[in-house]
Image (cartoon, rainbow, N blue to C red):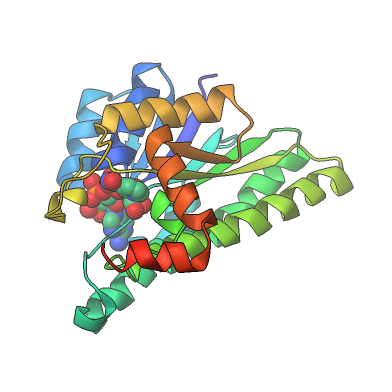
Amino acid sequence: MPKAHWIIGATHGIGRAVAEAALQRGETVYASGRDTLALATLTAAYPKLCHALALDITDQDAVILAASKLPSPLASVQVYAGTYTPTAVADAVWADTLKTIAVNLTGLLGVVHAVLPLLRAQAGQGQGSQLVLCGSVAGLVGLPKGQPYSATKAALLNFCQSLRAEELAHAARSHAALIDVRVINPGFVKTRLTAKNTFEMPFLLEPEAAAAAIWRGLNHTNRWMINFPLPMVLLMQALARMPAWLYFTLARRM
Ligand SMILES: NC(=O)c1ccc[n+]([C@@H]2O[C@H](COP(=O)([O-])OP(=O)(O)OC[C@H]3O[C@@H](n4cnc5c(N)ncnc54)[C@H](OP(=O)(O)O)[C@@H]3O)[C@@H](O)[C@H]2O)c1
């Protein structure tokens, strides 16, 4: 039986490239997003393998309904739904701030609430899975002019870390298969999300290269945080670890 994945945010950008890579390997994809036209082109290209489950991730009833239509076992649930408004806090529009939190954080937590019982049930029958949530290198350190986007990604990282610990404990305690919680932290990827940026983005990747890094990380490593590209990750980690006086001296110029 081919592997089956539920990919939310499969209509555009990174999630679309992740979905297409799986479909090209002959795996089954349940593809979600709001853009029904984009879902139709994906299902038309892979009529036997791709199934559309249109939803808005901020509508928890829609998420629960879509989850009820999934097959079992699922190899992975992956969430790439995300939104971004490049602003400093002082200039932010409150509605944009609420939307960013609703999609990037509340929406992802809602998916976890909806699928955890399904994944635990299949784990109880010996079928492990991967639960993959998309963060960002922006969640590794607070940088100016990226809020509240960076804050949602930092919160997501914290959430995934504790969820992974819980699932490791649950699998050991109940002798069930593991729900392997992973977080994806990309650097800059050329999508409609980053098309809003007016600055030059260092180490910019195409979505297909991002998808290749993601599948490499998921299928061939045990790394719970899949961070890429390396130069961008090293830069962000250096900023996160430097003394506060040095960090603020640099960050105030950004
Ligand atoms: N591009 C980058 O440089 C970069 C870097 C780090 C992290 N990321 C993260 O990567 C993920 C994908 O972003 P991207 O760059 O690929 O952006 P994108 O091209 O704009 O794709 C975003 C995806 O999220 C879906 N989405 C947005 N709002 C949604 C909602 N309310 N309900 C359901 N789906 C929704 C979109 O589908 P519909 O429009 O069809 O709903 C689309 O499929 C995001 O989590 C983003 O934060 C991106």
Give residue 100's position: percent from left, percent from top. 32, 68
- Using the image, determine if residue 44 lies above or below residue 251: above
Give residue 11's position: percent from left, percent from top. 25, 43
195 to the left or right of 102:
left
Give residue 79's position: percent from left, percent from top. 43, 48
Residue 70, visible in the rendered structure: no
- Residue at figure coordinates x 53%, y 37% from the top left: 76
- Using the image, determine if residue 6 lies above or below residue 219: below
- Residue at figure coordinates x 38%, y 63% from the top left: 150
Residue toward you, 200 or 185? 200
Classify residue 139 by image quadrant. bottom left
- Using the image, determine if residue 209 lies above or below residue 187: above
225 to the left or right of 199:
right
- Residue at figure coordinates x 45%, y 54% from the top left: 239
- Residue at figure coordinates x 51%, y 60% from the top left: 156
Residue toward you, 25 or 153? 153
Which quadrant does the C terminus fall into?
bottom left
Give residue 182's position: percent from left, percent from top. 57, 43
